[in-house]
Image (spheres, rainbow, N blue to C red):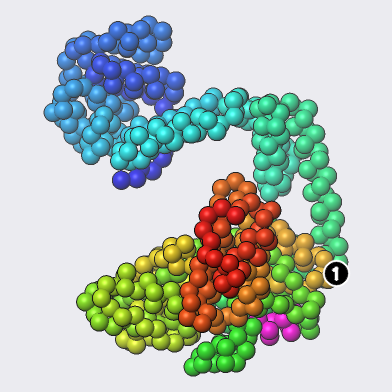
Amino acid sequence: MAYFPFFIDIDNQKCLIVGGGTVAYRKVLVLKDYGPRIHVVAAEISGKIRDLAEQEGSRIVLEQREFEDRDLENVDFVVAATEDGALNRRISHICRERRIPVNVVDVQDACSFIFPALVRDGDITVGISTGGSSPTIAQYLKAKFREDIPEGFGDLAVQLGSYRQMVKEQVPEIALRTEIFREMVDAGIAGGCFLSREEAQGLIHRKKREYQENREEQGTWENQEKRQVRIGTRKSELAVVQTRLAAAALEEKNPWVRTELVTRETLGDQILNKPLLEFGGKGVFVSEFEEAMKAGTVDLAVHSAKDMPMELEAGLTIAAVLEREDPRDVIVTCRGTVLEGKKEIVVGTSSPRRAVQIEALGPEFWPGAKVSCQMLRGNVNTRLRKLEEGGYDAIILAAAGLKRLGFLDGRMDGRFAFQFLDCETFIPAGGQGILTVEGRADDEALLKACRAVEDPDARICLETERKVLRLLNAGCHEPIGVYCRPAGEGQLELSGICGRQGAVRRVRLTGGREQAEEMAVRAAAVLEGREGEQHGEK
């Protein structure tokens, strides 16, 4: 069970600890530094507890006697730490009746609060809990936090806290204050967990000057009467939701920007009874907006990155790559559907990439069954409706779309079951889960606004995936998947699958970010069959 981490002030609160042995000593040792008045009652009290009481003076009161119910009167919280399990449970029962927070050591179901593993440095406290399931893991994480917290970090926190009022008085803009406090932390760490008042004041002056310069640039923007940014998007519910996410990010990072959505129904939205390859490929979702940007009727367009063609129209560019949503694919079935024992299972998908993988992996999911795929197109609601109508046993959708539409948060009233497929086993489409903002390459003001919402990890992963697809000359309607992800500090992992001409090839490479292009070239060579299958380090 997971516990919510309330951090409360227990200074001068009255804490009753029933028990006087080793466990009770550990609780007194933890609590004393947070300022409560500790009352220990036990038939036997260890020498360690007595030594602590002597050091702390009146903050720790000891009574060597048996526990009595009246000891629970006028206390703020209780720790039952005796070796008598029945007594501990009786104390817990009384406390719960009286709504007194109680901890019973090592008996999770008798606790209304628990003691986390704590890391403390001055005013900084990190609490770690596994809900009682694995104290060893909690202690492991505690040790890792101790290693990672710079020496003197607590002193730096107190020091920066003393500058808060100074920043508030000099900087009325809340967003600018946040930037200043963040830079103070970075500067303090760089200075050995010390930042003098003079250095803090200099940082404030610098940030205010930069802010004013940006304001002047914003004024230029306003004078050009380009505050209203028109963003092109398809009319589907998912496209609109995704565009609103991008628009909200642009407005948050660029207060002078006001966005307006311009919706259009593309050819790809109109023709649902044919594969995309028959009438233009995935570019049919993009080309109309590219023409609109060139004509000046929209300023930007938001796309699912996997829908973007390899080559953009001349004069256009990917102005921003937003943070990646869940890139996984999901098998969706109607709730209560039993597929075990069926001889044939029909999966709805119009993606050859999904088809080649589900037909190969299907026997692992549904032993003894033959898995076949049938074309399925339309928006998410349409596909789910077709599943409910019985046209398919299961369908495959992208997790990102389901999450952005809220389908995984109870929107569909439990009508469907979702099975997530990990990206290493079932490789996504290049760009899956990523939103891109496309704009005119010569519109410097808008490009700068877009850079403010850029996610560097998503950018390098998308560029690497698109490089592989470009080298393979891969269109949207081919059995090819490629997925790149950050893998540790400065590292990338690149996975790919290619099922052209009935031969399925896979690749997985790991290397530094500076090797991203080289990894893409190597991956493409493997997927084309020019090199043997590759797994492991580049």
- In the rendered image of this protein, does residue 364 appear above or below residue 215? below
Q: Amino acid at mark 1?
A: Gln
Residue at 60%, 92% (x, y): give it. 279
Circle 1 crowding by C-alpha within 10 Å: few under 14, some 14–19, many from 20: few
Whole-percent x and y of residue 88? 19, 28
Identify the residue position indicated by label 1 in the image.
224
Labels in figure, total = 1
Question: Image height check: is 167 above or below 366?
Answer: above
Is 217 colored magenta in this rendering? no
Can residue 429 be seen at all in this image of the molecule? no
Tell me which corner region of the image, top left, top right, bottom left or bottom right, holds residue 172.
top right
Q: Quadrant of the C terminus?
A: bottom right
Identity of the residue drawn at 73% across and 60% down: 451
Horizontal side, residue 454 vs residue 383: left or right: right
Q: Which picture quadrant has residue 264? A: bottom right
Q: Nearer the viewer, residue 184 or 496?
A: 496
Residue visible at 36% across and 40% down in the picture: 130
Question: Does 385 appear above or below 454?
Answer: below
Q: Quick one: SS at disc 1? A: loop
Horizontal placement of 379 versus 248: left or right? left
Residue 380 in the image, given as x and y percentages of width and height: 46, 79
Q: In the displayed structure, does residue 266 sit left or right of residue 360?
A: right
**Residue lying furthest left:** 86
Q: Nearer the viewer, residue 162 or 116?
A: 116
Expressed as whole percent of the image width and height from the top left, the position of residue 500 reads 52, 79
Asked whether the viewer can see residue 363, the reply is yes
By secondary structure, the bulk of the magenta-drawn segment is best described as helix
Please name the residue shown 44% across and 85% down the image.
376
Q: Is residue 284 left or right of residue 296?
A: left
Magenta residues (range): 285-293
Q: Is residue 291 magenta?
A: yes
